[in-house]
Image: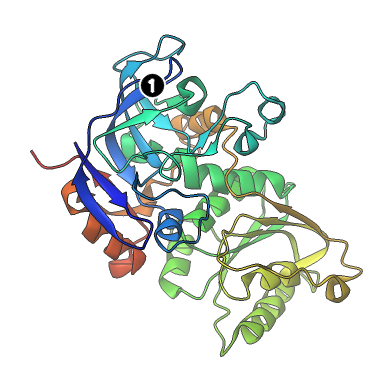
Amino acid sequence: MKALVHDGNGTIALVERPRPHIIKPTDAIVRVTLSSICTSDLHIIHGAVPRALPNTVLGHEFVGVVEEVGDDVRGFAPGDRVAVNVETFCGQCFFCKRGYVNNCEQGGWELGCRIDGCQAEYTRVPLAEQGLTRIPDHVTDEQALLLGDILATGYFGAEIAEIEPGDTVAVIGAGPVGLCAMACARLYGAAQVIALDIDAARLAVAKREGLADVTVNPAGPNPAAATKGAELAVRDLTEGRGADAVIECAGGAGTFEMAWRVARPNAVVSVMALYEESQVLPLPLMYGKNLVFKTGGVDAHCLDRVMNLIAAGRLDVSFLITHRFPLDDIEEAYRFFAAHEDGCLKVAITPPRG
């Protein structure tokens, strides 16, 4: 089968790989019908994910059809349409029982990182009973494609931000994760969503899709100036207080500081961003703000709940899929996605031609 592999030194290539097979009785083999490229795939290629293993098939965001299940897999059978969770988790360990599935003692982020992922024709999904979510017949592949990673991340970011009905929520970053976080903040009752980004086109998407009430472009000559502009803008929109909750999804230069600067005292700052450099928590500067910081990236413990919202028509982020490429052209798709070419937000990778 065709599969996209990285070598650990910044190079990717579409190669021929053997079709995966059942290794453990908890495995399933899924035929990939649609996959996507995530920014974290770029982080792996750039060497910013130390635990990633070279010569691994990339990708962790996909939907497909179950082809085969191991003897211990219950609730799924060949022919089932499924979305796949980015997190591999057992459901039985100390952390899983408390809902912290990305800290599973047997799993974590495995697909496309430490074991072969989904940018291929077939994928082996370990601990499949926990890692698969059935797609209802009336939900399309594109509506379900982003469930297991960026939509789960956006939902988790809104969930841990402790949003209450009527709150003002500031979301830093209007990329795919930020846009998902805005959509989920609405579900939690946010009365005002403020989107902050230096990309005017992405802010326009947030406004067009009804995800943000106000958009702020804090572009400046340096990160400090951008942060100051963002802080003043958010204060102007909140009677001088700052946002009740902040979800940081950008991971850019200065955006961590921007997150706590735009928050009001006693707010929750939910950090979903993946940084390529260490961030500083300058406690003397924030003394008296009494902020709560929560971090974690994706913790996809709630995919059945989110799928129910999609099925009910209350949550649809399929507009994020702006471009489509067959697997044969995935190397070009990577270049296109990384460059944000032609307003690209997310690409959908379809099966190879023929």
Residue pointed to by mark 1:
23
Q: Residue furthest left?
A: 354
Quarter residue 191 falls in: bottom right
Question: With 195 as the anchor, is 140 left or right in this view?
Answer: left
Q: Is residue 94 visible?
A: yes
Residue sitting at x 70%, y 72%? 257
Question: With 306 as the anchor, is 11 left or right in this view?
Answer: left
Q: Which of the pair 103/82 is nearer the observer? A: 103
Residue sitting at x 31%, y 17%? 68
Image coords of residue 132 (percent x, y) = 45, 26
Image coords of residue 300 (percent x, y) = 56, 37
Residue sitting at x 49%, y 24%? 127
Residue sitting at x 48%, y 63%? 207
Q: Residues within 10 Å of mark 1 (few under 14, many from 20)?
A: few
Give the quadrant of the C terminus.
top left
Quarter residue 76 falls in: top left
Display colour scheme = rainbow
Q: Residue furthest bottom?
A: 221
From this view, report whether residue 253 is shown above or below residue 146: below
Question: With 244 as the anchor, is 59 left or right in this view?
Answer: left
Image coords of residue 59 (percent x, y) = 37, 45
From this view, report whether residue 238 is shown above or below residue 103: below
Q: Which of the pair 196/14 is nearer the observer? A: 14
Count of residue discs: 1
Q: Residue furthest right?
A: 288
Image coords of residue 149 (percent x, y) = 48, 43
Give the quadrant of the N terminus.
top left
From this view, report whether residue 99 is shown above or below residue 74: below
From this view, report whether residue 274 is shown above or below residue 135: below
Amino acid at dot 1: Ile
Q: Is residue 137 visible?
A: no
Q: Secondary structure at mark 1?
A: loop
